[in-house]
Structures are given as structure tokens and as C-alpha cells.
Image: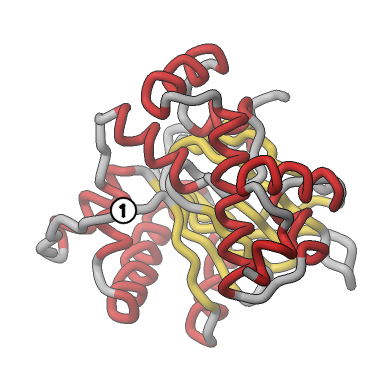
Amino acid sequence: MKIITLPDELSLSSSMSIVVYDYESITEISKQQILLNKNTFSFLQEGTKEVFFGDSAYAIDNSQFLLMKSGHCLMTEKLSNDSEYYRSILFFFSDEIVLQFIRKFKLEISVSKTTYSTYSFDYDSFIKRFVDSLLDISKLSKSLQENMLSIKFDEIMLYLIDLNGLDFLYSLINNSDNQYQKFIQTIESNRLNKLTIKELSFLSNMSVSTFKREFEKHFHSSPSKWFQDQRLEHSAFLLKNESKRPSDIFEEIGYENLSNFIHAFKIKFGVTPKQYQSS
């Protein structure tokens, strides 16, 4: 699968450190490999969106919008049931814009224990008016756009900080160089997501062969066996603690049919799911 690099492949000016793009599509994509060269707000308008990063995953409809840090992600876009098209207003901005904002407002960014590559926020009337204003600005000259968008960036960030605190802002500037930490975080965060080895390799910014080698070195197991064990452990939790039926969860756990799930469960736990549930 081809890797899509954004915003480069949207024919936007690469010299602009902050830019808006009104993206529309009548074609759905599923787990498209995306390399974000800039941080991005995705103000979803029509359809649904799902993203996987190495440390987080979100599925949203058009009552929400996303803030995504630059880096590797997998993206799914589905069309609206009503209008049968997908639309998202993309607001790209560089790391330098974030640092300028922090210096300008003299913000004290404390070290957060956990940082994530993506955050989800709910729309409100203020945000809806904000997005409308972005579209108005996008129709102006390039020189005027960049100056005005810089002001709009300050506006949206100050508003979100007032509502949510500073943790999401710290995540944007936290550029951890610890490849081992990133790798482990990618595995742990996606242990129950049905991602392929190739997709996990992409999120880890590794070749498939390097990913497998590093995985076996750190987890002392093949990826396929380790992920199967994690999902079966989760299925046992669902059966025991949430009273789920085997027929309700086998697809969620990653099995194509119920009989394969029961067989794998019995091999791991020595009893069938129903026997485990009633014990």
C-alpha cells in the first residue's frame, strides 16, 4: 500500500508553516498508511474517521474533531450515510508554530507522565463558528492567510487549554528519541486492535523484518502468538466480568467464526468459554 504524505500530497504550499485545506471525498479508505509531516486538526464535517497511532486510537463521528501530532498513523474514512460523502477541514501547523505559541503566552509546560499522538474533542457552538471562519480565511490570498491563521491558531489553542488543561499541548512538543519506548508503547496500545504485522511495523517506523526481530527480542514470543494470547486473555475477562456470550465476542477478539475461537480458548485455558464462565 502506498504511503500518503500530508500535507505534501494536497498540493499546498510547502513554505507555509500553517495552512487550511477543505478535504472532500466520495471514496472510502481503510487503514491507509499516512505520514503527517505537520501537526493537524481534523475538523470532521461529514462521515466517520478512525485513526491508529503507536500510542493511541480514536473513532469519531462528526460530533467530534481530532488533534493529531505529526508522525505515522493508519487512517480510515467512511462516507456519511445521508450525503454519501466525506468531508474534513484540515488545519495543518508546524512544531515551530507550537513553540512560538508557548513562548508568546509564557506557558509553563510541566512534564506529563503520559503523552499521546492524538486527542479527541467535542464540538460546541464556539468551535463550529471557528471552523466556519477558517473556511472564510482559506479563500483569501496566501500572504494574508498565513498571518490570519496564526491568530486563529492562538485562538483555538487558548480555548482548548481553558477547557482541557495543558497536557495535550505538551504532547505536541514531546519528541521522545527513545525508539525502544516508542516500540513498546505501540505494541501495548494496540494489543487488542486487529492490526496486521505490516500495519504495526509502519506505526513503529520499522521494516516488517526489523519489527519481528525486535518483537521476539523484547517479548520472547512471535507477534502472532503474543497478540493471540492477549486477545484470549481479554476474552476471558469479558466472559467472567461482563457476562458476555462467546457468540458476542469472537469477532471482537479477532476470530472469523465461533468454533475457531472456542478451539483456541480451550487450548489456552483447558476449558471451553462456557465452562470457564460458569466455573
Q: Is residue 202 above or below residue 186?
A: above
Q: How many marks?
A: 1
Looking at the rendered image, the quarter that the C terminus falls into is: bottom right
Farthest residue, direction bottom: 125
Query: Residue 16 at x, y = what percent?
Result: 43, 40
Measured as percent of width and height from the top left, residue 65 is found at 55, 67
Position of the N terminus by quadrant? top right
Helix, strand or loop at label 1? It is loop
Q: Residue at x 57, y 42 (%)?
A: 229
Report which residue position mark 1 lands on. 115
The amino acid pointed to by label 1 is Thr
Q: How is the image coloured?
A: secondary structure
Examine the rendered structure and indicate whether residue 47 appears above or below residue 1. Answer: below
Q: Quadrant of residue 209?
A: top right
Residue 29 visible in the displayed image: no
Horizontal relation, residue 126 to residue 51: left or right = left
**Displayed quadrant of residue 278:** bottom right
Position of 233 with respect to 103 (left or right) is right
Q: Is residue 46 above or below residue 1?
A: below
* Along the line of sight, the residue nearer the viewer: 175 or 90: 175
At 37% across and 55% down in the image, what residue appears? Answer: 147
**Relative to 277, residue 204 above or below:** above
Instruction: Return the x and y of residue 166 as percentages of the image width and height.
Output: 24, 67
